[in-house]
Image: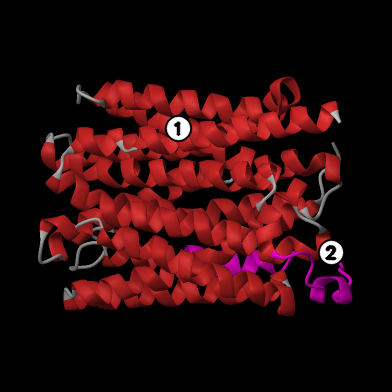
Amino acid sequence: MKVANNVWLFMLCQALTMSIASFVIFVGSIIGKTLAPDPGLATMPVAAFVLGSAIATLPVILSMRRFQRKRVFLFCALIASLGCVLAMYALQLQSFTTYLLAVVVLGVGLAAGQQYRFAAMESVAVEDVPQAASRVLIGGIGAAFLGPELAVRGELLTTTPYQGSFGLLMVVAILVFLVLFFFNEPERDQQQNDAKGRPLLEILAQPVILVAVISGCAGFAIMSLVMTSTPLHMHFENGHSLVDTKWVIQSHIVAMFLPSFFVPWIIRRIGVQGLISLGIVALLVMVLVIFSRYDFVNYWVSLVLLGIGWNFLFVGGTTLLPEGYRETERFKVQALNDFTIFGIQAVGALLAGLILSKLGWQALLLISLPILALLIVALLYWRKSKHQLASV
């Protein structure tokens, strides 16, 4: 496959931008526990970060429709830099409220980065869309190591713990801004962009769209609940070291993106439906592995399975989404899809700390089961509708 240069550029931007996410996921709840007035609010910074992305998703994507993707990408990179500065100020004040505001701003800066996959997909031929989406996600492997390393190496750079970490993260945000200048945006017909297309309800009524959206939502909901809670459950409740906790989180994030090397091959062999089914199996096994044993190896294996399951569901949903919309409908369908996904992720991150402190780890894991059951029902409905169309 001849890959457009934009795909490689967005792979690099993915590595840099998503390091913001891995940074906040790793250290957000740890800092939150030291600043929060109640231990049950320790995961609120991670939730606030995801909430910032969710809130910004609609205006960011709709802005891209009017101002084009490149300008919005550049603007959001600057917003992320501002969030780092605000976080450094919050740590200086030791203010939980200001810290929450800072991570919300960081989440807003990240919102545009969630669109890298669509920008890459629009830069290649239709038959190369799965490869483009997968290759952009490969950049997340670099983010898996970069974000937590910035947090650890910057922890003691200043007299205020982790203030230097956010300083290093600001340098990364500035690098993203510089790299994005080389993005060559494909030309689009403005009249086509301005066309309204079909009503959203009509688009959503398509089984393929339902599977695409539910697949992404299921992956993010389960990943958000388990991943956000793991540093607290592993480090604070079961006494594993910060280094071991970091390794588990890094391995998890690598597992979120490493399968992207093989996903195009899997899709060619068993199709997107088969890919999503494998993701469901991975998440079910994840629950079993970490349900009642809390050794390091259990955390490591389960979080790796969590990453693989998330990848299969997210890439599967992303690949299916364009099958259900026309060119004139792409921005509003992408906006609805990502707003729903990241809104659910924010709710999961917010509830993770409360569920863990009030109901316990096992209850948190069992919530995964009805979510996966809903996805299975959607898959069966899609399969049945395809058979009906084929028989007509």
Identify the amino acid type marked 1: Ala
Seen at 40% across and 25% down, the residue is 284
* Percent position of residue 386, x then y: 75, 32
* Percent position of residue 19, x then y: 46, 54
Q: Quadrant of residue 183?
A: bottom right
Position above or below: 327 against 144: below
For label 1, the SS is: helix
Q: Quadrant of residue 269?
A: top right
Which stretch appears magenta?
172-199
| Horizontal arrangement in the rendering, residue 111 relative to residue 45 (left or right) | right
* Percent position of residue 387, x then y: 76, 27
- Depth check, front residue: 46 or 178: 46
- Front disc: 1 or 2: 1
Colour scheme in use: secondary structure
Q: Which residue is mark 2?
A: 186
The reply to whether residue 262 is visible in this rendering is no
**Residue 239's disc number:** none
Estimate the spatial distance between the alpha carbons at disc 1 and disc 2, rounded to whole Å: 40 Å
Q: Which residue is mark 1?
A: 373
The reply to whether residue 285 is visible in this rendering is yes
How busy is the neighbourhood of tag 2: few (under 14 within 10 Å), some, or many (20 plus)?
few
Seen at 53% across and 33% down, the residue is 377
- Depth check, front residue: 286 or 173: 286
Seen at 15% across and 56% down, the residue is 40
Identify the amino acid type marked 2: Pro
| Horizontal arrangement in the rendering, residue 178 relative to residue 371 (left or right) | right
Position above or below: 209 against 48: above
